[in-house]
Image: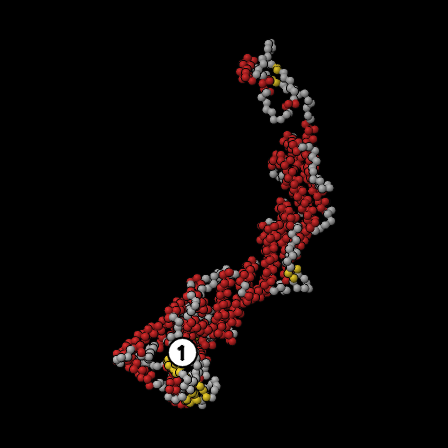
């Protein structure tokens, strides 16, 4: 039975094989001993067991006796403690002469068993923990002494420090493996204690890493490392010489040391205080000094290029050596030092001016990015606005280059639109119809687009009226030329760009006046390339800018009615004169309404040839029969004629026939030479009745221009009342159809004066109407408020000057539309 029980014991090692027990069976009851001890085997174990209990009816005991002497518990405990302490000492002993081997007093398994014996069997974990703690203290003290003995205080010391900390970390990890039973069998049950790994790192941090001398040396090493890297790349500033650019690559040989340092300090939770913060302080100090040196010496664009390169260097350095979480702090420190508000304000304007002049959109984008990084876009936006305004102002005030004003402005606007999209990431304002988004979007949403618009408006205001006038004249030229070789899309794209400039001028009425007068001349003289294009421009101006442009549509209605009227007249004339076809009747007239056309009644005089006068009388008779209450005023200054002229060399060697396209006044003068070959100025004036100034300009265009069908005596560029004129029979020109233009300079000056006069008259009427309308609604207003309201009411058409407003107020007081308050002369009342 006893043998059966022993065979059931578990065996987990070779301990039991060393024992040699002897078995003695004892019985508690008296009686004769059993006659025979049965031999049991595995197959009869269960049945024999049952029979024994039934036959004996009592309890039997088994005694186990060991051959070897028993182990003394206290001796075994002391031995275990000694093994553990010696193991800690051996593991944490600094390596000598480069050796890295560890001489333990026992095998790893025996050391682990010793730890288990002390804490689990003998329950003396506190004493063992204290002993281990003492050994750790000794080891850490030895590390501190070793580091303090190192003479170097630069990067070499930093390498020694990092290597020592890495060695320590590896040994601590070994201790943690050996003493796992201590951590999980004892420390976890005592919340006030630290696990072996944490205890070791706490000790080394307190005695070594956080020691003031060690902190100072570590900080110094970090500063020297990063300074050496920064000094070895890109720029080498000198206090006495200009900054020199170099292609020398940086020295990155110590980056591995810093990476290892970063890893260790992260392990002991000292990364920010011992590495990141010194790095950031060194960064601020270095770049502040560099900025102080470079900003005054480098050109603005080169300095910003330098900043961009430095920031990329710092990003690369941080990603390669530090935690990526530190990137924001390091870049912020770099940006704050390199791109301070003071530096940006001093350099942004210069850089912006240079880049706009060079049309460098990519560099503008980099400049934008740098300002965006430090949240100083407002500085760049202000510099950008000022530079664009200066550029536009310079263009519009260049009086010697007025003819090229609009093409240059278009080029500038195209570049700025591209810069807005590609450099500043904003949508430029549309060129044509003002959409709801453009009207309602705040300046904060598109600061650079608003800055561009403001710059154009202020630049245009530097020379009042002229930009608006030149825009209208440019459109006039474009509508005369038409699209020619351009595609229709390109034509409208260019025209839309020109119309886009209209939004920037404060003198909307000036543009409208010049545009309408030019449109009228194009239509009357049949100089427009396409009526469809003209109508489309009017539609865009009307819908996108000002409903007042809708008056242009009335001109086309007048022309259509006039055309129908003329066809009816010719058909009637052909019927009354049998055998004459209507298309052979050369007289053509346009009947227009004064309200739709920007022309006043012509006050000039001219005696037309008999056949011309008869044609006019005939048409008047026809017209009055249809419109008895209408009065026709003939404007012969706008008339034109086509003359057939014969020229020869005066010796009968041949005749050349030319068709001369001339004004009506030119035709009247030239026809006189059918009667005589030579006329004096006075005789011409007597026959034609043309006023002196008009006759002088007419004769000058015929005798002094590029195409001279008359010869003036004496020769000269100007026409005097004493001159005489001879028909130029020797006139030569390869073209058969020849247009003889008028004297453009005189016509332009007179047209300019007339247009300016009309604008001034209209503005006076607008100011009066606005003041009366405002006062009629308010009844009583102070002088200052009345001026402000008047400006606000008229700003969509033009910006009236304070002087003009004051003058019209006084005139309205004189006319009894307004009256001053008896007590306060600065207050006005509306007189109903």
Residue 467, placed above or below residue 6: below
Where, quadrant-wise, is the C terminus in this rendering? bottom left
Where, quadrant-wise, is the N terminus in this rendering? top right
Point out residue 448 in the picture as x, y percentages from the top left corner.
50, 63
Q: Is residue 352 visible?
A: no
Q: Count the numbered circles shown.
A: 1
> In which quadrant of the rendered view does residue 54 lie?
top right
**Which of the pair 482/360 is nearer the observer?**
482
**Which of the pair 83/317 is nearer the observer?**
317
Residue 806 horizontal side relative to residue 350, left or right: left
Would you call the spot at circle 1 few (<14 residues within 10 Å), some (14-19), or many (20 or more)? few
Residue tagged by mark 1?
736
Q: Is residue 691 visible?
A: yes
Residue at the far front: name it: 653
**Which of the pair 779/463 is nearer the observer?**
463
The secondary element bearing badge 1 is classed as loop
Color encoding of the figure: secondary structure
Residue 396 horizontal side relative to residue 479, left or right: right
Residue at 39% in and 81% down = 657
Residue 610, placed above or below residue 441: below
Residue 207, placed above or below residue 15: below
Residue at 64% in and 54% down = 250
Point out residue 183 in the picture as x, y percentages from the top left corner.
62, 36
Residue 251, placed above or below residue 782: above
Point out residue 190 in the picture as x, y percentages from the top left corner.
61, 37
> In which quadrant of the rendered view does residue 800 lie?
bottom left
Point out residue 653 in the picture as x, y percentages from the top left corner.
41, 84
């Amino acid at each position: 039975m006893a043998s059966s029980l022993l065979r059931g014991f578990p065996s987990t090692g070779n301990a039991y094989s060393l024992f040699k027990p002897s078995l003695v069976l004892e019985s508690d009851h008296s009686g004769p001993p059993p006659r025979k001890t049965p031999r049991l085997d595995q197959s009869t174990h269960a049945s024999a067991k049952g029979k024994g209990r039934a036959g004996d009816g009592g309890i039997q005991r088994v005694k186990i006796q060991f051959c070897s002497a028993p182990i003394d518990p206290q001796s075994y405990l002391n031995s275990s403690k000694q093994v553990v302490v010696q193991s800690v000492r051996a593991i944490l002993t600094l390596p000598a002469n480069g050796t890295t081997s560890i001489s333990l007093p026992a095998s790893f398994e025996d050391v682990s068993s010793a730890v288990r014996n002390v804490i689990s069997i003998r329950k003396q974990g506190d004493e063992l923990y204290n002993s281990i703690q003492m050994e750790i203290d000794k080891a850490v003290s030895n590390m501190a002494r070793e580091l303090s003995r190192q003479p170097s205080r630069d990067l070499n010391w930093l390498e020694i420090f990092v290597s020592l900390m890495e060695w320590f970390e590896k040994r601590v990890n070994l201790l943690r493996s050996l003493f796992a039973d201590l951590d999980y069998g004892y420390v976890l049950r005592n919340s006030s204690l630290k696990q072996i790994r944490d205890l070791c790192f706490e000790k080394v941090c307190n005695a070594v890493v956080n020691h003031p001398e060690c902190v100072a040396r570590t900080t110094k090493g970090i500063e020297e490392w990063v300074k050496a890297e920064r000094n070895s790349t890109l720029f080498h500033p000198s206090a006495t010489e200009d900054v020199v650019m170099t292609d020398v690559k940086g020295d990155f040989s110590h980056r591995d040391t810093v990476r290892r340092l970063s890893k260790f300090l992260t392990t002991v939770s000292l990364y920010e205080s011992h590495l990141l913060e010194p790095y950031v302080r060194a960064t601020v100090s270095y770049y502040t000094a560099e900025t102080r040196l470079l900003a005054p010496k480098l050109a603005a664009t080169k300095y910003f290029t330098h900043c961009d390169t430095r920031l990329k260097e710092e990003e690369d350095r941080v990603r390669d050596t530090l935690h990526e979480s530190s990137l924001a702090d390091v870049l912020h420190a770099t940006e704050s030092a390199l791109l301070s508000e003071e530096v940006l304000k001093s350099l942004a304007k210069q850089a912006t001016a240079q880049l706009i002049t060079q049309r460098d959109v990519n560099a503008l984008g980099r400049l934008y990015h740098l300002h965006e990084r430090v949240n100083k876009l407002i500085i760049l936006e202000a510099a950008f606005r000022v530079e664009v305004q200066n550029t536009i102002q310079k263009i519009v005030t260049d009086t010697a280059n007025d003819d090229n004003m609009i093409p240059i402005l278009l080029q500038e606007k195209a570049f700025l639109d591209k810069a807005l999209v590609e450099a500043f990431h904003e949508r430029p304002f549309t060129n044509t119809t003002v959409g709801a988004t453009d009207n309602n979007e705040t300046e904060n949403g598109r600061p650079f687009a608003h800055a561009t618009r403001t710059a154009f408006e202020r630049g245009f205001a530097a020379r009042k009226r002229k930009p608006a006038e030149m825009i209208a004249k440019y459109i006039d030229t474009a509508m005369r030329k038409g699209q020619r070789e351009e595609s229709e899309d390109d034509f409208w794209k260019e025209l839309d760009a020109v119309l886009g400039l209209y939004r920037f001028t404060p003198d909307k009425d000036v543009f409208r006046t010049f545009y309408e007068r030019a449109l009228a001349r194009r239509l009357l003289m049949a100089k427009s390339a396409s009526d469809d294009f003209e109508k489309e421009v009017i539609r865009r101006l009307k819908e996108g800018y000002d409903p007042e442009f809708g008056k242009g549509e009335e001109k086309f209605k007048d022309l259509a009615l006039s055309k129908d009227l003329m066809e009816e007249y010719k058909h009637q004339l052909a019927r009354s004169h049998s055998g004459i076809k209507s298309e052979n009747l050369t007289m053509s007239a346009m009947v227009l309404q004064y309200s739709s056309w920007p022309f006043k009644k012509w006050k000039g005089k001219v005696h037309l040839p008999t056949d011309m006068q008869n044609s006019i009388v005939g048409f008047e008779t026809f017209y009055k029969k249809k419109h008895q209450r209408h009065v026709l005023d003939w404007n012969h200054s706008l008339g034109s004629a086509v003359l057939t002229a014969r020229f020869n060399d005066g010796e009968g060697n041949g005749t050349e026939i030319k068709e001369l396209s001339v004004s009506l006044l030119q035709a009247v003068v030239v026809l006189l030479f059918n009667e005589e070959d030579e006329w004096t100025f006075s005789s011409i004036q007597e026959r034609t009745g043309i006023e002196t100034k008009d006759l002088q300009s007419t004769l000058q265009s015929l005798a002094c221009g590029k195409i001279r069908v008359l010869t003036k005596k004496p020769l000269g560029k100007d026409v005097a009342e004493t001159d005489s004129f001879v028909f130029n029979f020797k006139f030569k020109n390869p073209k058969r159809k020849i247009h003889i233009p008028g004297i453009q300079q005189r016509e332009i000056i007179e047209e300019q004066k007339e247009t300016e006069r009309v604008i001034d008259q209209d503005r006076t009427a607008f100011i009066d109407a606005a003041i009366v309308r405002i006062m009629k609604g308010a009844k009583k207003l102070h002088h200052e408020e009345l001026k402000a309201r008047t400006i606000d009411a008229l700003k969509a058409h033009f910006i009236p000057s304070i002087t003009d407003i004051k003058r019209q107020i006084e005139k309205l007081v004189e006319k009894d539309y307004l009256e001053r308050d008896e007590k306060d002369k600065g207050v006005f009342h509306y007189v109903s």
